[in-house]
């Protein structure tokens, strides 16, 4: 069977929630959890060991329970990424704690670059090479998962009724800019990363972004219980020295926790794979508070414009698809194994090869990632894998202009970047073989799947 037929045939809908009762007594309830997810000094984070803790990291989220459906868990973690079997374990353990199934659990990284990575299978491969504990810390990851699971169990004991769902959005000023600057030939001429000092790149327009922060809130009559926010941009200001931080996205979120006490704020990084703060960020320490305030102001503006609507269980739907994202033809087991076994390969190269091999192995089965949508009346929240290009989020909104559509990316991280079809022709960092582990066919496939999710949630 060809690769194309495999990923088209084996994308399967796990579950479309069908309500078995329309009783007016059916009730939605919400439980919250928020636990520490900070590594210790000396532990590995994205690029180097931890040398200091600037501010602490969290794993936080909500559990929605229903009378006639299994619970749904929506969560976000202040880590750079959760990959392959790492995500499987997160979903399994949180599902067990919430008394639901893993396909009804979403885990998203915010992608802070001074945060940990989680990939149990890759760490096992590195252990065979004597590199265990240098890039991943399985014990720390399992401890964090256990804390989150325990917090879910405790939170469910005091879950509160949800009577209304709020939705709103607001423009965020001077944060996001597209990373890929094209030349006259239509190909990438300059890369404008999270921090940028190139005058030409700084002077260039923002490019294709989603300037709006989307917000979904849950209420018990007039009392806010939780606020979920979605914004499409890499979350970095400065990084890479081992100074652990939840970055300007986490700091803005934490500020809103204090400003709206009693309502847990959970932030999700949207489809920001090709978006960052580079136009507005030179990487200086004093710029992090500026970015924090701009995002916090966007969160506040969205909050101040919220529209609340009553919600019933009959208006709630959960749809999940197991999908087989297409992988590049040149991603081959033999070459990756050779790199792992070669004495000439540097440690960093072996880590990359091990992660690629873990993704290759995952892609030899019927599915390698999951995508899902939660519908709450006229609100639709999509949950997607990888470092997704912003075009996917913009396309989803166009598919349902009558609905309030949000997107969280950075779910299954094993695929790394997910570009658009033309993006692979354009070149640039994100669509290169060392950054993206899917093929250009991914755009047609994912857009079809997103349309299918949105349609199924309406039935």
Image (cartoon, grey):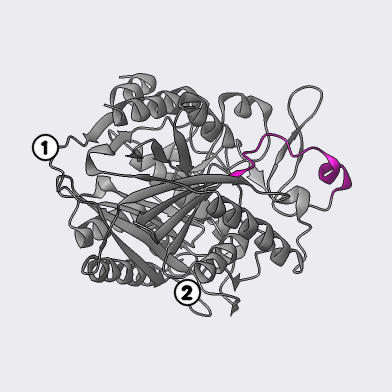
Residue visible at 73% across and 62% down in the picture: 290
Disc nearer the start of the sequence (1/2): 1
Which quadrant holds the C terminus? top left
Q: Is residue 243 above or below residue 366?
A: below
Taking the image as shown, residue 59 lies to the left or right of residue 260, namely: left
Q: Is residue 340 above or below residue 381?
A: below
How far apart in space, not on screen, are marks 1 and 2 (Cα)?
44 Å
Residue farthest toward the right in the current orientation of the protein:
199
Task: Write down the residue under mark 2.
Answer: 39
Taking the image as shown, residue 200 lies to the left or right of residue 72, namely: right
Element type at mark 2: loop
Element type at mark 1: loop
Name the image quarter holding residue 252: bottom right
Residue visible at 55% across and 45% down in the picture: 169
Residue 82 visible in image: no
Name the image quarter holding residue 150: bottom left
- Of circles 1 and 2, the one toward us is 1
Local crowd size for mark 1, using a 10 Å CA cut-off: few (<14), some (14–19), many (≥20): few
Which quadrant holds the N terminus? top left
Q: Position of residue 440 (x, y in %)?
A: 53, 26
- Compare residues 399 and 307 and report the one nearer the observer: 307
Residue farthest toward the front in the current orientation of the protein:
222
Numbered range of the magenta stretch: 198-212
- Compare residues 397 and 260 and report the one nearer the observer: 260
Number of numbered discs: 2
Name the image quarter holding residue 130: bottom left
Task: Write down the residue under mark 1.
Answer: 20
User: Of helix, strand and loop, which mostly describes the magenta segment?
Assistant: loop
Report if residue 323 lies within the magenta region. Answer: no
Local crowd size for mark 2, using a 10 Å CA cut-off: few (<14), some (14–19), many (≥20): many
């Amino acid at each position: 069977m060809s690769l194309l037929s495999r990923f088209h045939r084996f994308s399967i809908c796990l579950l479309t929630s069908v309500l078995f009762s329309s009783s007016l007594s059916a009730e939605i309830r919400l439980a919250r959890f928020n636990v520490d997810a900070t590594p210790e000094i000396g532990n590995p984070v994205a690029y180097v060991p931890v040398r200091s803790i600037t501010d602490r990291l969290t794993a936080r989220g909500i559990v929605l329970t229903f009378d006639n459906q299994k619970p749904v868990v929506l969560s976000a973690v202040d880590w750079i990424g959760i990959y392959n079997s790492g995500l499987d374990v997160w979903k399994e353990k949180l599902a067990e704690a919430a008394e639901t199934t893993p396909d009804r659990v979403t885990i998203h990284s915010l992608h802070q670059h001074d945060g940990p990575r989680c990939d149990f299978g890759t760490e096992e491969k590195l252990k065979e090479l004597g590199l265990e504990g240098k890039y991943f810390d399985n014990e720390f990851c399992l401890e964090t998962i256990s804390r989150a699971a325990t917090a879910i169990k405790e939170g469910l004991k005091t879950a509160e009724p949800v009577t209304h769902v709020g939705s709103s959005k607001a423009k965020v000023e001077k944060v996001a800019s597209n990373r890929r600057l094209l030349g006259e030939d239509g190909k990438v001429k300059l890369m404008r990363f999270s921090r940028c000092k190139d005058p030409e790149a700084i002077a260039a327009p923002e490019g294709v972004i989603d300037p709006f922060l989307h917000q979904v809130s849950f209420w018990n009559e007039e009392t806010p219980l939780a606020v979920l926010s979605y914004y499409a941009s890499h979350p970095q200001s400065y990084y890479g020295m081992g100074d652990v931080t939840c970055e300007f996205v986490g700091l803005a979120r934490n500020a809103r926790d204090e400003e709206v006490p009693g309502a847990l704020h959970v932030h999700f990084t949207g489809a920001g794979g090709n978006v960052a703060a580079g136009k507005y960020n030179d990487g200086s320490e004093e710029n992090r508070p500026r970015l924090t305030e701009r995002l916090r102001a966007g969160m506040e503006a969205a909050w101040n414009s919220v529209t609340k609507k009553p919600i019933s269980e009959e208006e709630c739907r959960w749809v999940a698809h197991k999908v087989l994202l297409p992988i590049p033809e040149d991603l081959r087991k033999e070459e990756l194994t050779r790199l792992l076994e070669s004495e000439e390969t540097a440690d960093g190269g072996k880590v990359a090869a091990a992660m690629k091999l873990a993704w290759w192995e995952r892609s030899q089965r019927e599915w390698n990632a999951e995508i899902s949508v939660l519908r709450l009346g006229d609100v639709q929240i999509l949950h997607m894998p990888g470092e997704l290009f912003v075009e996917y989020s913009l396309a989803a909104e166009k598919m349902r202009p009558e609905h309030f559509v949000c997107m969280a990316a950075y779910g299954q991280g094993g695929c790394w970047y997910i570009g658009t079809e033309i993006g692979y022709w354009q070149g640039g960092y994100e669509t290169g073989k060392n950054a993206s582990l899917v093929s250009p066919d991914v755009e047609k496939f994912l857009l079809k799947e997103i349309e299918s999710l949105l349609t199924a949630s309406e039935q």
